[in-house]
Image (tube, grey):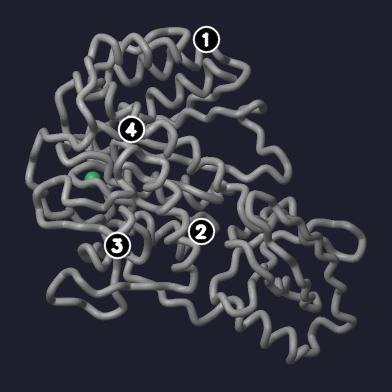
Amino acid sequence: MADREPETLAVMTWIIDNPFVLSANLHGGSVVASYPYDDTPQPNPRGCCVASDGPDTALFRRLAAIYAQGHAFMHRGEDFCHMNERFAGGITNGAMWYDVPGGMQDFNYVFSNCVEITVELSCCKMPPESKLLTEWKSNKKALLDYIEAVHMGVKGLVFDENNNPIHGAFVGVEGIDHNVTTTERGEYWRLLLPGEYTLVASAVGFQAMRASITVKDGETSRHVFHLPRRSDSSAPDSSSDQVAAAIAGGAFVPKIGPSATPPPPTVSSSTASPPTKEPELAQTLSAEFVTPPDWQHHDYASLESWLRDLATRYPDITRLYSAGVSVQNRQLWVLEVSDNPGRHEPGEPEFKYVANMHGDETVGREMLLLLARYLCETE
Ligand SMILES: [Zn+2]
């Protein structure tokens, strides 16, 4: 851990300490939604072209497709960036594209309850400011649709027989070798595609319990478990131990090392969206905001003042805090937007977007600043 940069450690801690359920990490340099794993079980000398699938690949493909389909043209999967890259449906497995040991989306999936995808928003990492209007138009629906996906699957609670929450209980799904663990309030969220499932909840000192659930499209299923305490918790209960072991173990754990730097993509300022008269577009899109955006790139100081301004104008629905500092002593700003900021609301799944991880990839940063303002002003 000692060799990690302070921002890496701060973000790892932030991911683990918060009950996030769904996430996307915004980048630039291509146009595609990429899903775990980025890393491969064995070192791959080619550095690409080998899919590294996990137990939730079907779910990840669906999540990536939600972003790609909501985007104006990502779903077409064409070679937008002139790099001979075609991504069917606008999505790709991370390692199939190129190997990244120790990437953030793998970390989320392996070490937390959160599932994350990585979205590359634009061929040109830092397009002219005049393109930001088009980027907002292209990404707005995708950004909003993807947040809604946090409600797919099942959520619920794990209690003991006296309705006391069990913290750290495992909730697994038979046939999918990846469990989630409960919060201190006993909550769990498990994103799942529509279908019939058997959930298994287990905890040390308790008997494991099973439940059959149906997940329907567009609905959140709910299930509350009550686990009986073992009469003699020192006596092994082989069946529930096996269940717990089956749920907890066996998942492929990628190597987690310092973030790798992706290969530099060809820079191109071309865009695949149809040309629109910019002054007209600016007027239409600015009308969505109470405070019309400046449609500019924001450096650290102006990003900070944009966030402070929002937090000041909307104190009842925002909380601005820092997750830590970077190696250059800059704050890692987090703007929480919630009807109850600063308080986890029992049962409500938490969602995060992360951008500006690579500071030269500006579109993700600008999209999140716009999204934050849009969410506050349309609340
Ligand atoms: Zn990047």
Where residue 44 sits in the image (x, y, percent)? 19, 77
Give the labeled residue for mark 4. Answer: 138
Amino acid on which the number 1 mark rests in the picture? Arg
Residue 358 lies in quadrant: top left
Of 59 and 65, nearer the camera is: 65
Mark 2 or mark 3: which is in front?
A: 3
Q: Earlier in the sequence, mark 4 or mark 3?
A: 3
Of 286 and 177, nearer the camera is: 286
Packing grade of label 4 (10 A; few <14, some 14-19, many >=20) is some
Residue drawn at 70 percent across, 85 percent down: 241
Give the labeled residue for mark 3. Answer: 94
Lateral position of residue 164 relative to residue 60, left or right = right
Amino acid on which the number 2 mark rests in the picture? Ser
Amino acid on which the number 4 mark rests in the picture? Ser
Q: Earlier in the sequence, mark 2 or mark 3?
A: 3
Real-space Cα separation, disc 2 to disc 1, in angstroms: 33 Å
